[in-house]
Image: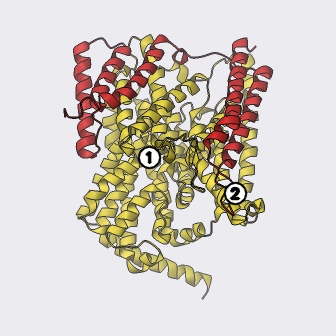
Amino acid sequence: MPDGKGLNRDVILGLGLLAFSLLILLWLIPSGVEVQQAGGMAVTPTFFPYGVTAVLAVLSLALVVKGFAAPSSAESAGEKKFSLAVVIIILLLLASFYGLEYLGMVPTGILAVILLVRLFNYRNWPRTIIFAVVFVLLLFFFFEQVAQVDIPRGVWFDDLY
Amino acid sequence: MSAWHAVADYVVTYGANFQKGALYFFTFKNILAIFGGVTIGTFCGAVPGMTITMAVALTLPFTFTMEPLTALSLLSAVYVGAIYGGSISAILLNTPGTPAAACTCMDGFALAQKGQAGKALWMANYASCVGDLTSTIIVIAICPLLGGIALYFKSPDFFALILFSITIIGSLCGNSMIKGLIAGVLGFLAATVGMDPFAGSERFTFGSLELTKGLSFVPLLIGLFAIPEVILQLNRSRKMGGRALICKVNNVSPEDSKLSWAEFKGSFRHMLRGGIVGLILGIIPGLGATPSAFLSYERAKRASKHPELFGKGSLEGVAAAESGNNAVNGATLVPLLTLGIPGDIITAVMLGAFVIFDLKPGPLLFLQHSDLIFGLFCALIMCDIALRLVGGLFIRYAAKLTTRMPTSLIFPTILVLCMFGSYAINTNLFDVGIMLVFGLVGYFMALLEIPAIPFLIAFVLAPMLENGLRRSLAVSNGDPMILLQSPIAWVFYAMTILAVVSIIRMNLKRKACKSEEAPRGKADDDPIRHSV
């Protein structure tokens, strides 16, 4: 027998997607798509986004109906649960993006590896630091020297290396 | 002249040309270029973020001083190696090294989690060789004829072909058809971001210069597939005190590390089918290896005696995906060599190589430089031999090194690799942002059990579908009947209807099986969930 959580999840997801499709239809397409009706052009640039979003709205409604009629099981594997560690890693991902701009890719990469290794419960500090530095420097030299990609130094360390 | 005479003439001319090409190709430096190229390509393909395009483009400057055939052999070898190399990280890390290997993740990684990474890697190696060899042999035999077929394709035919390709989404929806279709629709929407290629107006860019080029495919792909896995592994690893491994490597029996003859034989028909699918899709400009892998996989799933194992660790699935994506290698050269049209971005890079050597690809090339063309065909066959040997060595090395690394070390490195890789594609930090954003999108999709694969397929196919539709309607001044006027398009529409009916039947059958199994207490049939 399906439980209530399954029903709620499908219904909530369906309603959320329906709201998202209405947002696209009523606001994002009118304000975000330039329509230059050139002569002889049969289909405008809004045709495809409108069509696709309409399909999304219909499918969202179908998901809501399915949520009421035949709710899916709400069982979830342990690794798919939202935990504090997941919140930290998401914040780390967002911080690393800003780190790339200011610190550059090498220091950000080293810090990210150290923090993530610790987050993954590896407790040996010296090994973690050596591993992070060696790995990121190897990557840096590969991309700079072999692939000829100019790796960003960051605003703060631009003149340092 | 009778038809028999024409066929005999065709065979004799081809035989003579092939002999000339073989004499031109079989030199030490050409063979060295092949083995070197496959090694470089396999390495680049295996590193997440290193794209095939990047590998081929980086090799191009090193070919300026070489002879034309050596240069083209090297570039082809890098291409073949890189497409295969993508399967290594797809199987071991669930991170497709190349977009074409995304399909291999589904079964390859599931097998790795069950302790059968060795089996999956060997199957990928054999399937890559068989798929590519099948396609290459057919390409060599009927190259001018195949080029002629693609020449007849017009916009409505192209639209119908893409419409048919989209039915792949339906069969890869996972447990919920509605959620799979929603993922596909979201992929279509994501593909509309950027400059409208037809009218030149901006869509959903909101003043961002970076977004005018659209969402970069590779950062989006890396984000969708690698980041969610890092986050999910974090929970798994913390539960096991950081000692959890990506793949089950302890107590792995020798049988799980090697591919048996029976397993190879059982998947052989999928490899051949993948070779044909790759040949057909590769010959049509613009499609490439990713749709080919998914279509080959989908066909294999339908033809398999055990479709329920697909996505949960099926060797047939690995064989179909890998043969499908590798079979495109030789086929993409057909429009380039016969029509002068690059079939994909890699052949566009190769077109650059032809131009460097003052060669103009097209029908005249067969008359003026037949030794070069047939030498290149020999190079493609040699690539498969090199792939088998180099790939075998790589499997031993990569499997030993990678699968014994604990998650606490390997996943942080994946994240940094993703950052470097996403940046290196366009040397743009914005792409790193796209990778991170789609990483989070992918994670929440995983939480909500919305599959990422349909999103990806739709993202790849959407621009082609829209272009085909809008170009057709522009030609007909908005009359939609143009879409129904071509017999080629009708063939694809019929195939689309057949595919849809088949998918619906498959879903009904699966539901019926599930409802029969439920009373027997089979609560969870997902082996991946319990394997680590």
Marks 2 & 1, CB-CB < 8 Å contact: no
Residue B367, position in %: x, y?
42, 80
Residue A148, position in %: x, y?
27, 46
Q: Colour of chain B?
A: yellow
* Labelled disc at residue B492: 2
**Residue B247 visible in the displayed image:** no
* Labelled disc at residue B126: 1
Mark 2, Cα crowd under 10 Å, few <14 / some 14-19 / many 20+, is: many
**Residue A76 visible in the displayed image:** yes
In the structure shown, which secondary structural element does the residue marked by tag 1 occupy? helix
| Colour mapping | by chain
Splitting the image into 4 quarters, where does residue B368 fall? bottom left
Q: Residue at x 48, y 35 (%)?
A: B108
Q: Residue at x 68, y 60 (%)?
A: A41
Q: Chain of mark 2?
A: B
Q: Which chain is red?
A: A
Q: Chain of mark 1?
A: B
Residue B513, position in %: x, y?
73, 28
Front residue of B268 and A24: A24
Label whose residue precedes the other's in the sequence (2 or 1): 1
Q: Is residue B346 above or below residue B417?
A: below
Marks 2/1: CA–CA distance: 31 Å
Q: Is residue B215 above or below residue B10?
A: above
Q: Amino acid at mark 2?
A: Phe
Front residue of B261 and B117: B117
Residue B19, position in %: x, y?
37, 74
Q: Amino acid at mark 1?
A: Tyr
